[in-house]
Image (spheres, rainbow, N blue to C red):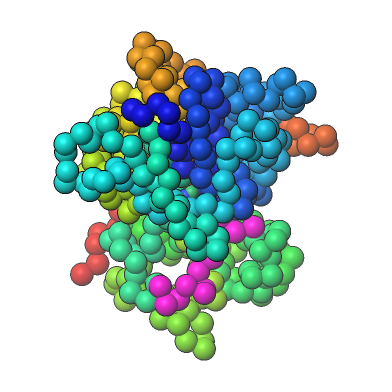
Amino acid sequence: MEKHLPVAVIGAGPVGLAAAAHLLERGLEPVIFEAGASAGAALEQWRHIRLFSPWRFNIDAAAVRLLEPTGWTSPRPTALPYGGELVDNYLTPLAELPAIASRLHTGARVTAVTRAGLDKTHVRNRDAAPFVVRVEDVAGEVSDVAVSAVIDASGTWSTRNPLGTSGLAAIGEERAGARISSPLPDVTGQDRDAFAGQRVLVVGAGHSAANTLINLAQLAKEEPGTRILWAIRGASAEKVYGGGDADGLPARGQLGSRLRRLVDSGTIQLHTGFGIASLADSERGLTVISGDGRTLVTDVVVPCTGFRPDLGMLRELRLNLDPAVEAPTELGPLIDPEFHSCGTVPPHGAKVLAHPEKDFYIVGMKSYGRAPTFLLATGYEQVRSVAAALAGDQLAADAVHLELPETGVCSSDAGTSCEVPAAASAPEAEPNGCCPAPEPVLLGIPTGLAHGRSGVQLAPPSS
Ligand SMILES: Cc1cc2nc3c(=O)[nH]c(=O)nc-3n(C[C@H](O)[C@H](O)[C@H](O)COP(=O)(O)OP(=O)(O)OC[C@H]3O[C@@H](n4cnc5c(N)ncnc54)[C@H](O)[C@@H]3O)c2cc1C
């Protein structure tokens, strides 16, 4: 690797900034490209959601070593922050440190990565050639930046899964874009006006859906006329409710039983086996049509359908990705949501994350591809190991370790990451904004499904 060139870090989310901190510790020079206006731009979109993992698992050790000399103190390790608190109390101070700020380019979207002078088919001197990162700024100016290595920490937030059941957009989905919200709208807060008094259809059977449905029920209490529809592909919502034999941990029951009560009382109208085939917009509203011909008429759709990585910008690189999960090949089987729960993912680093393209790594949320079970603590260990590998310290790169609570288990739903709302995992906040230590500390959502998604009954495909 061309040591005189910087190492590109794509994305200034928690994992991208941690990568920069580790690179600095290793004496390597990071250059960070962030598409958003500031660090933590994706987290900004769900700042109203409380994380299910406490502070001590959400901050990176190298980042803390940069922060502490400036007088920064860690929030209470056992408290569960909101997304917004993670930004305000950790990411923003980190991004503002001169060591980071001087290397951080915001409003800088990476659109492609390649090897200088070599397209994907060329092999000669490939490993020694610098990378070229193509960056577009907010004014549309495009530049190519030469770097020695690339760490892609760009997350998956901006590429949600489509509403269509087969992995493709439902027919009419793009045209109906104005009636489709972001994946986790703040329905009782800043997005309230778009939902108050409306017919709202929530699509998906993950914890994002549960979160949004419960918040919508609160809104409906205050804003009469708000109607809540919920469409899932499965034959039943038992997985989302949890409880009984299907529940791994009792705390989850709180959320599930609240949701079940709202469905039983008719506040939420549940439609099972509803695989979306098409959408048709008209003056009457948006008609959502299932594969078996049922229709739901709505004003706004909330797509809680999960996320997938943007691989388009990596097209000129030689990648090795799991055919199902789109995570690095060795990692894929460890996190496949068909079979897996995230509490048991072994610690992993540069070796597992490596691609045939030397000195290129996908880390963080994006490294899990389509699997919804990524945890920050895992990402921080990934970037520690990757920075060590890039610095040539193979011993440190290979010595991966991760301390997760033994009770850590995770959702295998395709909804979103393994986020769980406060109600499910966190005791109520104390008046000072903190919350008591959760017992046991959860690092995920217990699905109670030992075999991941393969244990869930799907409605038969419609003809
Ligand atoms: C609602 C929710 C709750 C979660 N709760 C938890 C939790 O409690 N505990 C836990 O451990 N994990 C949790 N996660 C999972 C995961 O830890 C978070 O998604 C986390 O934000 C992932 O960090 P990241 O740095 O990998 O990606 P992101 O935070 O998504 O950051 C990626 C950054 O890259 C930028 N970017 C994207 N594309 C480009 C590009 N082409 N060029 C330049 N920049 C780009 C984005 O703007 C963004 O700032 C949760 C996820 C969600 C969605």
Q: On the image, which quarter does residue 278 sit in?
A: bottom left
Circle count = 0
x then y, percent, for residue 356: 23, 33
The answer to whether any part of residue 282 appears in the image is yes
x then y, percent, for residue 302: 51, 63
Please, is residue 393 above or below residue 93 in the view? Answer: above
Question: Magenta span has 448?
Answer: no
x then y, percent, for residue 185: 59, 59
Q: On the image, which quarter does residue 421 sit in?
A: top right
Residue drawn at the location 20% of the way across and 34% of the way down? 125
Which of 38/321 is in front? 38
Which of 40/335 is in front? 40
Report whether 343 appears left or right of 57: left
Please, is residue 258 above or below residue 294 in the view? Answer: above
Residue drawn at the location 47% of the way across and 87% of the way down? 282
Span of residues in magenta? 174-186
Residue drawn at the location 82% of the way across and 34% of the way down? 432
Please, is residue 131 above or below residue 457 in the view? Answer: above
Report whether 242 appears left or right of 440: left
